[in-house]
Structure formats: C-alpha cells, structure tokens
Amino acid sequence: MMAGVVLRTGVDILEIERLHDALERHGRRLLERVFTNRELAEVEGNTASLAARFAAKEAVAKALGTGIGEIGWQEIEVLRGPSREPVLYLAGKARQLADALGLQTWAISLSHSRLYAVAFVVASG
C-alpha cells in the first residue's frame, strides 16, 4: 500500500427470516427507523432487498470503525444506480466520520440467497 493511502473494509451477513420476523413484530416503525423513504420506494417491500441494505448499513458502520448508534441508520443510504448497481450515500455524522478518516471513494456489493443477505464495502482515500 502506498504511504498516505487509507483503505477500510466492512462486511455483514443477515438471515432474511430474522428481518422478516422483526418486521412482523415492529412493522412500519422499524422500516421508518432503519430505511430512508427513497430506499423503501425502491425495494417495494422486498424483504431480501431490505435485508441486503440492512447488512450494507452494518458493513459501512464497520468500515467507519463504529457501530450503528454512533451513526444513525438513515445516515447510510443504499440506492440503485443507472444500471441497478448499489450506490452508497452518506449523510450527517457518517459523512463527517468518513471525511475525518479521509475516505472519499466507496465500493459496495450486495447479494442474497433464499436464506441470507450479505454486503461487502471497501472505502479508500
């Protein structure tokens, strides 16, 4: 690695059924606490897609060296780009922390099977 280059990673995996059960218990309140309106509009209730975004938020928090709590769920937003690729947007304290760490470029990958959703992020600066 070159001197002065910062590289951070984060990964998270989630059982889709676990999110489904949480949504059964907490419904709209959970959705509105964790996901932005734009995220909810894009996934249209697809639990596997929600689980992948949930995992992405956890993975980003890990790459930032913190957890959810220090930064809010909605400060990390995962939307679709023009080719339906995941695109990451940071706001608030998450953006401030990324800037303080010198993290300027983010790559994110999401995947899910019938049972699990996984997200992997790489940040550099």
Image (cartoon, helix red, strand yellow):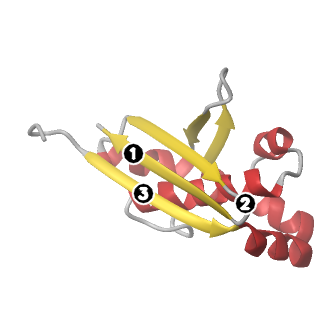
Q: Foreground residue, 60 or 94?
A: 60
- Residue pictured at 50% horizontal, 58% vertical: 59
Secondary structure at badge 3 equals strand
Q: Which residue is mark 3?
A: 10
Q: Position of residue 55 (x, y in %)?
A: 60, 60
- Between circles 1 and 2, the one closer to the viewer is 1
The crowd level at tag 1 (other Cα within 10 Å; few <14, some 14-19, many 20+) is some
Q: CA distance from mark 2 to mark 3?
A: 18 Å
- Between circles 2 and 3, the one closer to the viewer is 3
- Mark 1 / mark 3, whichever is N-terminal: 3
Above-or-below relation of 20 to 55: below
Q: Which residue is mark 1?
A: 122
- Residue pictured at 81% horizontal, 44% vertical: 43
Q: Position of residue 62 (x, y in %)?
A: 43, 62
Residue furthest to the top in view is 82
Above-or-below relation of 42 to 35: above
The crowd level at tag 2 (other Cα within 10 Å; few <14, some 14-19, many 20+) is many
Q: CA distance from mark 1 to mark 3?
A: 7 Å
Callout 2–callout 3 Cβ contact below 8 Å: no
Q: Quadrant of residue 116?
A: bottom right
Q: Which residue is mark 2?
A: 34
Above-or-below relation of 73 to 27: above
Q: How many marks?
A: 3
The quadrant of the image that shows the N terminus is top left
